[in-house]
């Protein structure tokens, strides 16, 4: 071999090694891809929303704000929005905290009903829950008004008011508060309350000065969640408020976009205002939670077991209250749906009506192509969203907790940005992105999948990081020392250990994706409806009986899916029993 040939071979080897250094390893490619995807989902829609709101072809423009806020009713809009959100938060916090205290700290009767009252409303979609209360408390067709008319006169209840909106949203959200506060009360040492009672304090004083201050972090978390949920609520304001021209931000945005031609800049200005209110609420809650956080540490090395308090003569009163709550949150909404689904047309109960009950509405659903398409779309989107979110967030959780990558904390914060973005604002932001994009996905199933993945990314990250934090890094290090690659270690070691948390997150995201409406209402197109959209359309068309049958099928489908997932989860360690 000549000297020239050897020089040529050496240069080829150098060039090949240089090329290999430029090609990323599977670990780098996967980590970089996940980080880029999270950043895209979290930031790009908001960027387009602000750009489309503040800029046009001629530069900086505030015409959208003038059209959105330049009328005399904007003060009323802001008042309605805050009254609705704060009222629903107060109601759900009062009911949920009271029931949690009774369940944990007292010998309350009917404890078996607490589980159903806390789980069933979470499964029932918000749109069905709202429609159920229309059947119960509408001035025209409400069954409760029919029952109360002989005592209080014609139509004593009117669900189409701001108070009706607060009632429905607060009741539907109270199980979330209940679940959060049950955990807080169970982890609190009861000896602190006993010391206060032995010092001469009454039970009311002990509750006000000892118990509630000790569970303040959980209370603030509950307030934050319910405020955000109420601000982004679309079903309740759209179905109840618009009947009497009661607008909040979400229903006003929907109205602006449904007028012709749609004013995207004005809708964007309203969305920015709603987003600022949500962010302000989050900031205030975190500020309050951060003050004196060390004073709320009540779990120590000393074991304790809460002793239930005897209610004495108040036991029948409390038991009656629990039965009424269970009837209002679970029994009445479900029964009225089933009753309506068995009617040929909606009528108030009577002996003649009960003798004419029929299953024709369910038979009609079998021949309704839209219903079958919507069910298939909801299943595909629910399963697809849950699978994609938990797969991506499992890797994102590894980056945030295990890696030494600079800026890993920023990635974790990015995943939680959608938490403060109301669903309708997210749908509008994605409209800004893909209406201007050359990629033709607006109005397709794919844009709904993007919206769902973005909206539920924070919940997937929470489940994944919680599970990742419970796994010792020694297991991962042992696999790497034994010669396993990072990807093989992740698949064969970490992923099986993460399975319980991943599956729990998967189940939750499946349920909430199945019932999502607020962002879907702005992004779907005919032929790509999901069940919540189809129910909304049936309500607008006055097809109450078919709607009720569709709602019963939807609830049963969710119950079956959750039951199957629960059984699978029991096999991989979701339960300890």
Image: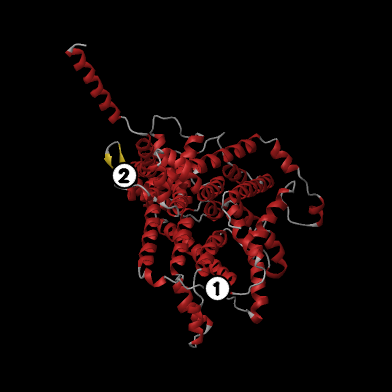
State the CA–CA distance, disc 2 to disc 1. 58 Å
The residue that appears at 68% across and 62% down in the rendered structure is 144
**Residue 141 in view of the camera:** yes
Front-most of residues 543 and 48: 48
**Residue 389 in view of the camera:** no
Give the number of the disc on residue 11: none
Front-most of residues 319 and 346: 319
Q: Are marks 2 and 1 in contact (CB under 8 Å)?
A: no
The location of residue 513, given as percent across then percent down, is 53, 46
Compared with 22, 99 (above or below) is: below
Q: Secondary structure at mark 2?
A: helix
Q: Secondary structure at mark 1?
A: loop
The location of residue 172, given as percent across then percent down, is 57, 59
The location of residue 87, given as percent across then percent down, is 49, 64
| Quarter of the figure with the N terminus | top left
The quarter of the displayed image where residue 50 is located: top left
The location of residue 33, given as percent across then percent down, is 37, 37
The residue labelled by disc 2 is 54
Crowd rating for badge 2 (residues with CA inside 10 Å; few <14, some 14–19, many 20+)? some
The residue that appears at 48% across and 54% down in the rendered structure is 247
| Quarter of the figure with the C terminus | bottom right
Tag nearer the camera, 2 or 1: 1
Give the number of the disc on residue 305: 1
Compared with 98, 51 (above or below) is: above
């Amino acid at each position: 071999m000549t000297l020239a040939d050897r020089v040529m071979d050496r240069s080829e080897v150098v060039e090949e090694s240089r090329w290999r250094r430029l090609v990323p390893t599977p670990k780098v490619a996967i980590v970089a891809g996940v980080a880029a995807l999270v950043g895209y989902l979290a930031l790009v829609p908001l960027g387009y929303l602000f750009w489309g709101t503040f800029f046009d072809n001629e530069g900086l423009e505030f015409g959208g704000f003038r059209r959105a806020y330049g009328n005399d009713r904007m003060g009323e809009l802001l008042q309605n929005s805050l009254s609705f959100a704060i009222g629903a938060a107060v109601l759900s916090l009062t009911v949920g905290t009271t029931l949690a205290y009774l369940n944990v700290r007292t010998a309350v009767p009917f404890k078996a009903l607490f589980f159903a009252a806390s789980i069933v409303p979470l499964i029932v979609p918000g749109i069905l829950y709202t429609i159920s209360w229309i059947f119960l408390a509408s001035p025209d067709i409400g069954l409760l008004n029919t029952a109360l008319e002989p005592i209080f006169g014609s139509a004593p209840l009117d669900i189409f008011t701001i108070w009706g909106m607060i009632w429905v949203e607060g009741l539907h959200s109270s199980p979330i508060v209940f679940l959060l506060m049950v955990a807080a009360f169970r982890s609190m040492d009861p000896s602190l309350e006993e010391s206060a009672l032995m010092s001469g304090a009454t039970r009311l004083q002990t509750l006000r000065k000892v118990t509630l201050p000790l569970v303040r972090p959980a209370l603030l978390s509950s307030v934050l969640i319910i405020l955000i949920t109420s601000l982004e609520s679309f079903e309740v304001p759209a179905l109840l408020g618009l009947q009497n021209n009661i607008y909040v931000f979400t229903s006003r945005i929907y109205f602006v976009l449904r007028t012709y031609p749609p004013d995207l800049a004005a809708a964007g200005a309203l969305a920015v205002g709603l987003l600022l209110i949500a962010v302000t609420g989050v900031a205030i809650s975190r500020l309050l939670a951060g003050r004196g956080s060390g004073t709320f540490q009540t779990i120590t090395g000393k074991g304790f077991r809460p002793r239930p308090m005897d209610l004495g003569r108040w036991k029948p009163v409390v038991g009656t209250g629990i039965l009424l709550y269970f009837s209002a949150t679970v029994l009445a909404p479900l029964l009225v749906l089933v009753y309506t689904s068995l009617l040929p047309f909606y009528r108030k109960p009577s002996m003649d009506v009960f003798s004419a009950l029929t299953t024709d509405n369910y038979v009609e659903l079998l021949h309704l192509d839209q219903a079958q398409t919507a069910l298939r779309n909801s299943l595909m989107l629910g399963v697809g969203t849950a699978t994609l979110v938990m797969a991506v967030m499992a890797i994102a959780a590894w980056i945030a907790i295990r890696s030494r990558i600079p800026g890993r904390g920023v990635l974790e914060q990015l995943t939680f940005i959608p938490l403060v973005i109301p669903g309708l604002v997210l749908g509008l932001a994605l409209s800004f992105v893909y209406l201007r994009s050359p990629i033709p996905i607006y109005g397709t199933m794919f844009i709904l999948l993007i919206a769902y993945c973005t909206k539920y990314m924070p919940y997937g990250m929470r489940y994944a990081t919680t599970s990742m934090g419970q796994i010792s890094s020694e297991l991962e290090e042992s696999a790497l020392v034994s010669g396993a690659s990072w990807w093989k270690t992740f698949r064969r070691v970490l992923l099986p250990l993460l399975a319980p948390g991943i599956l729990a997150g998967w189940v939750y995201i499946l349920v909430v994706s199945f019932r999502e409406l607020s962002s879907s209402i702005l992004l779907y197109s005919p032929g790509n409806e999901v069940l919540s959209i189809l129910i909304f359309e049936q309500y607008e068309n006055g097809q109450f009986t078919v709607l009720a049958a569709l709602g019963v099928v939807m609830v049963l489908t969710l119950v079956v899916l959750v039951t199957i997932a629960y059984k699978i989860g029991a096999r991989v360690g979701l339960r300890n029993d």
